[in-house]
Image (tube, rainbow, N blue to C red):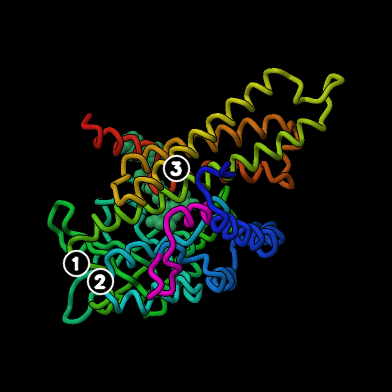
């Protein structure tokens, strides 16, 4: 009988390689990175690139591994990944692929997605950063905020207005190298969670962006970015159920050993019922993710399912993190306990990459409500 319905021996080899990497290179450093408010991405990505983790589903001609979505899922189940390259891969010119995508997949360049602005988050079309065409350049002015990897990125995939006309065809997506004049990190932001990931406010003052750094066609950036968001949102699903499974396991171990009123806490029926409920919800989320991978592998559109999955992922991981922290009692409130970090970090999925309400709007629209 097959040991696993979804994953082959080869998938499991990749899973082990990723798990070993996390055990050796990430976990021993995580407390220090949390303290410092930053992960040394150039160092970490370089090592991941050498192991082939960063371009699993990308074509080998750009330094990828040319594997399918199931391999990428294996990777995502083990670790969160870099997120700013899909638009270059899907829409970028050969020049952009060779100059930015390939080094990013090798881990030689760090990338960031730069969309959100102080007055444009959920309503992306309200953004004001403007790229004005001038000969063979665009002159970029404006600012972005809450940008993950913002203090370390070598390039941004940035969405800017290229026209004042109303509607969705007034935006374009650019690769913006951060070593050009006019770029500055105006502020490194202090966050309640995800502290080992740096987040920044960025400022663009008359930056001269070569026209060849335009991704795809001028005026199509909004649609391209919406497609890039699909990749980012999808990666939230394995992250959510992977984290939830890990927290649940650690909590069960604790509940077996912690005696209250003369018996281990796990013997309390109400607690066992909640653990069972969460286990069921985690499996449902995982199966929705596998369904999405089947849709993607078949070349079908999974926008609605990804939006549904992102919404449920946020609910499941927050419910599990909150419930598990409760069962750790006072110890769960201590910063030294991993559960307190998971509790703080879990909130981000409801906001980052599109808030829960935005996911509901998309689902309702695609359902024709
Ligand atoms: C840690 C972190 C990392 C991030 N990384 C990045 C990044 O790398 N790149 C990037 O571009 N952005 C990034 N973001 C920004 C993120 O995508 C935005 O914060 C998010 O889209 C929400 O936008 P906003 O903060 O402006 O909230 P707003 O748009 O002001 O919305 C506030 C709240 O209003 C509610 N709401 C919004 N729209 C509706 C609606 N239609 N119906 C009902 N309620 C609604 C929601 O509850 C929402 O949370 C990051 C954010 C955080 C916190």
> Distance of mark 1 from mark 3, alpha carbons?
31 Å
In this picture, residue 178 sits left or right of residue 127? right
The residue at the far left in this view is 165
**Residue linked to disc 3:** 289
The part of the chain drawn in magenta is 58-76
Count numbered badges in the picture.
3
Q: Residue 144: which disc? A: none
Q: Secondary structure at mark 3?
A: helix
Identified at 35% across, 52% down, the residue is: 229
* Tag 2 and tag 3, C-beta contact below 8 Å: no
State which quadrant residue 140 falls in. bottom left
**Residue linked to disc 2:** 214
Can you say which quadrant of the picture contains the C terminus?
top left
69 over 289 or under it: above or below: below
Q: Is mark 3 within 8 Å of ligand 1?
A: no
State which quadrant residue 321 falls in. top right
> Distance of mark 1 from mark 2, alpha carbons?
7 Å
296 over 67 or under it: above or below: above
Identified at 55% across, 29% down, the residue is: 280
What x and y, as percent, mark residue 305? 35, 40
Disc 3 residue crowd, few under 14, some 14–19, many 20+, Cα 10 Å: many
Q: Secondary structure at mark 1?
A: loop
Disc 1 residue crowd, few under 14, some 14–19, many 20+, Cα 10 Å: few
217 over 245 or under it: above or below: below
Query: In the rendered structure, which disc, 1 or 3, sits on the residue that comes first in sequence?
Result: 1
Identified at 49% across, 63% down, the residue is: 149
Q: Is mark 1 within 8 Å of ligand 1?
A: no
* Tag 1 and tag 2, C-beta contact below 8 Å: yes
Identified at 45% across, 51% down, the residue is: 235
In this picture, residue 277 sits left or right of residue 313? right
Q: Is mark 2 within 8 Å of ligand 1?
A: no
**Residue linked to disc 1:** 217
């Amino acid at each position: 009988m097959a040991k696993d319905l979804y994953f082959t021996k080869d998938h499991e080899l990749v899973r082990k390689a990723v798990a070993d990497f996390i055990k050796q290179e990430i976990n021993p450093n995580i407390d220090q990175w949390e303290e410092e408010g930053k992960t040394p991405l150039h160092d970490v990505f370089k090592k991941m690139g050498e192991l082939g983790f960063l371009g699993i589903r990308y074509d080998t001609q750009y330094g990828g591994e040319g594997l399918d979505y199931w391999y990428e899922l294996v990777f995502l189940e083990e670790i969160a990944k870099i997120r700013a390259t899909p638009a270059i891969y899907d829409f970028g010119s050969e020049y952009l692929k060779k100059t930015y995508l390939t080094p990013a997949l090798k881990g030689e360049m760090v990338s960031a997605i730069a969309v959100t602005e102080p007055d444009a988050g959920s309503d992306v079309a309200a953004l004001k950063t403007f790229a004005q065409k001038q000969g063979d350049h665009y002159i970029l002015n404006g600012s972005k905020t809450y940008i993950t990897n913002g203090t370390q990125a070598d390039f941004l995939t940035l969405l800017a207005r290229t026209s004042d006309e109303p509607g969705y065809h007034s935006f374009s997506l650019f690769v913006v190298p951060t070593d050009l004049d006019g770029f500055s990190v105006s502020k490194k932001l202090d966050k309640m969670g995800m502290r080992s990931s740096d987040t920044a406010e960025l400022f663009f003052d008359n930056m001269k962006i070569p026209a060849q750094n335009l991704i795809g066609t001028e005026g199509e950036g909004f649609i391209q970015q919406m497609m890039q968001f699909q990749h980012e949102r999808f990666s939230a699903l394995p992250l959510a159920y992977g984290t939830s499974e890990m927290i649940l396991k650690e909590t069960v171990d604790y509940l077996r050993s912690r005696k209250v009123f003369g018996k281990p806490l796990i013997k309390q029926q109400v607690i066992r019922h909640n653990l069972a409920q969460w286990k069921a919800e985690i499996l449902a989320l995982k199966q929705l993710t596998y369904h999405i991978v089947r849709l993607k592998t078949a070349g079908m559109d999974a926008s609605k399912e990804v939006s549904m999955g992102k919404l449920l992922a946020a609910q499941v991981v927050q419910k599990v993190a909150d419930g598990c922290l409760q069962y750790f009692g006072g110890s769960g409130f201590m910063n030294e306990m991993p559960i307190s970090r998971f509790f703080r970090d879990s909130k981000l999925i409801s906001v980052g990459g599109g808030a829960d309400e935005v996911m509901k709007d998309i689902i309702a629209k695609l359902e024709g409500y």
